[in-house]
Amino acid sequence: MIAYKNGQTSVVLRFKLLDSSSTVGAGLTGLTSASTGLRISTIADNESAATAYTVAGSTIESITTLGTYATPTATKCRFKEVDSTNHPGLYEFQLADARFAVSNAKSLIVSVSGATNLQQADFVVPLVVDDPYTAKLTDKTGYSLSQSFPANFASLAITAGGAVTAGTVSDKTGYSLSQTFPTNFASLSIDSSGRVDLAKIAGTSQTARDIGASVLLSAGTGTGQLDFTSGVVKSNLAQILGTALTETAGQIAAGFKKFFNIASPASTMDALTLVATATNLTNAPTSGDFTSTMKTSLNAATPAVTVSDKTGFTLASDGLAAVTAWTVAITGNITGNLSGSVGSVTGNIGGSVGSISGVAFPTNFGALGIGSGGHVLNVDTLTTYTGNTPQTGDAFALIGTAGAGLTAIGDTRLAHLDADVSSRLASSSYTAPLSAAGTRSALGMASANLDTQLATIDSDIGSTTSAIYARIGAPAAASVSDDIAAVASKTGNLPASPAATGDIPTAAAIRTEMDSNSTKLAHLDADVSSRSTYAGADTSGTTTLLARLTSTRAGLLDNLDAAVSSRSTFAGGAVASVTGNVAGSVGSVSGLTASDVGAIKAKTDSLTFTVSGKVDANITHVTGDAVTGSGTTGDPWGPA
C-alpha cells in the first residue's frame, strides 16, 4: 500500500473491490454512494473506536470530479467507481483530513463491506513521520539556507586554522590572563553569591555587633525616619495585632487613665470590686440563679398577695390566647356568645344546644321515623344501595322485564317442571350415565375406534362362518334350512314303532316339557329388559383390558374420532423442525424460496471434489491482490 505522512491533507485513495459471486476473483462493478448496505469504516492503529460511514446513515457522498479532492461534509466521506470498463472493481475514496492526522498513529485501516455481492475488503494505509513525496538532500552543493545569521556575522575573524579571534571575553573559563592581581588577592573571601566577607574597617577588626553598636541614628519625621527625643522613640498606636484602630481620638487614652490612674487598684481583668452604682444591667447572665442574699432582699421588697377570687381583677381580651388546653370543668353556664369557631368537641354535650348556625337539615327531617334501636322505620323508594356495595344500580333493572333477564326463567322453561324431580328418578339413587371410557370398558372394547372394532368382529365372523361351513359341508339344496326341512318331512312320516314307543311329540308338547322341567330355562326368572346392566364378574380378558386402559390412554383413545386411514397426510400448521428424512416433496420452506434453493444448487454443482471432502480451488487473488505462480519449486506464488 501507498504510505502517507501523518497529517497529510487532500489524500485520494483508490482500492479494488472484488465480486464475492465470482469464482475467478473478478472486480465488483456498479457500486455507488447509494448502494444498499454499503459500509466504509476507518480506524487508526492506536484508536479503540472506528469512524464508520454508511448508506443507511446517509454519510456517504459521491465524488464530483475523480482525482480531485473535495473536502467531505462533516461526519461524511466520498465514494465513486473509477472505470467499470477498463478498471472493473476500482473505486475512489476521499476521507476527511482528520483521519490521516491521528496523533501518534502509524497506520490507518479502511474496511469496505455490506453491499450485495461485495467481498469484504480491508486496506492498510501506513502513516509515516517523514513525507515520502518530498525530495531529500543528498549533498550540500547548490543549496541555500534560510537560517538568519547574527548581526556582523560577516565581520567575524576566522583564521586559516579555524580559530576565531575574540575582541572581548565575557568570562575567564578556560583562559589564562596576563593581568597581575593584588597581593594576597587569593586570600579574598567571596561567597557563592559574589559577596566579600569584610574582617576590618580602616584597619580595625570588626564584628557584626560592633557595626550595629556604632550606628548613629538621627531623629526626623521623613520617610524611613524615627521621631525620638533623648533616645526615647515616640510611638503612635495605629494597629493592634494587624487590625487598624478606628476609635475616636482621645478615648483610648482616657480609658487607660480611668482604669490605671489609681494608686492601689483592687480590680483586675478577672473581677471588678469597685462598682459605685449599676444603673442598667445590659449583659445579665443567661444561666445560674440569684444569690440567697439577693433572694431575701427581693422577697422583702415584694408584698405578698393572695388571689382568692376574681373580684377586682380584669382579664385582657387576649388573656386566654396562651391557653393550649383547658383541663378543668366549667360548671357554670357560658351566657355569652362564642363568636369564633370551635375546632372540635371530642366529648359529649350533656345539655341541649339551642341552635347551631350554618347547619341545614333536609326538608321534612322532623317527619323521619326512627325506631328505638336507631333504625329508619320506613323507606319509600331505595334508588341506589351503597351501604355495603356488593351490588350497584337498580335491582329492577338488574332483574329485567318480563321475558328477559331473571324474569325470563318464569316462562315455558319453568313450566316444564310440572312435578318433583325426585319422582322422575330411575330409582331411589341416581346413577350417572357412563362416560365414553366407561361405555368402552363395559362393552369390552380394546380401542376407541369403532371402525376397527367392527372390522375385527366382521373378520372373526367371517373366520367362524368359514369354519362352520367347513364342518357342515355344502348344503344339498339351496340352503341348510332347506336341507333340514327336507329331513323333517321325512321324519314326520316315521311310524311310532319300532322306532319309538310313542308318537313324536308335537311342538306344543316340547314347549310344555321345556317350561316345566328345563333347569336352564328356569334361570330366566325375569325379563331381560329388567337386567339392562351386567352385574357378573369380569372375565380375565376384561380384567386385563381394564388394567391397561388407564385414564391417560382413554383420553388419547377419545382423540381417535376418525379412521387413521383418513389422516394419511398432515394438514396442520408449520412444522418447527424435521429430524428424520422427508421422503416426499416439501410444499414450502419459510424464508427460503425455490429460486434460492436453485441458486444454491447451481453454486454447489459447480464445485469439484477430486479428493473427497476437499474442494478443488484455483487461487487467483488474496485479500484483493492478484496472485501469480503455480506454487511449485521455481514458480512460487507471489503478488502479480
Image (cartoon, rainbow, N blue to C red):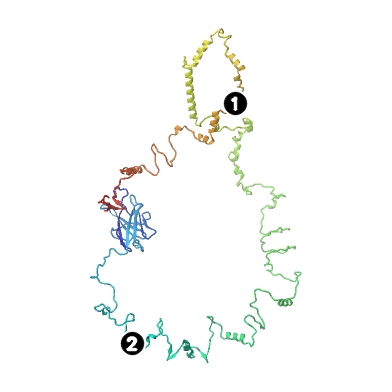
Residue 346 in view = yes
Q: Is residue 474 above or below residue 157?
A: above
Direction left: furthest residue: 142
Q: Quadrant of residue 567?
A: top left
To which residue does mark 2 refer?
180
Q: Is residue 106 above or below residue 412?
A: below
Residue 27 in view = no
Does label 2 or label 1 sit earlier along the sequence?
2
Left or right: residue 193 compared with residue 520? left
Looking at the picture, tell me which residue is in the foreground, 525 or 36: 525
Give the x, y percent position of residue 533. Answer: 58, 28
Q: Is residue 26 above or below residue 496?
A: below
* SS for callout 2: loop
Residue occupying the point 38% across, 60% down: 47
Question: Which numbered marker is on residue 125?
Answer: none
To which residue does mark 1 refer?
531
Left or right: residue 269 compared with residue 215? right
Looking at the picture, tell me which residue is in the foreground, 401 or 296: 296
Q: Quadrant of residue 329?
A: bottom right
- Identity, as a three-letter code, of the amino acid under mark 2: Thr
Give the x, y percent position of residue 529. Answer: 59, 25
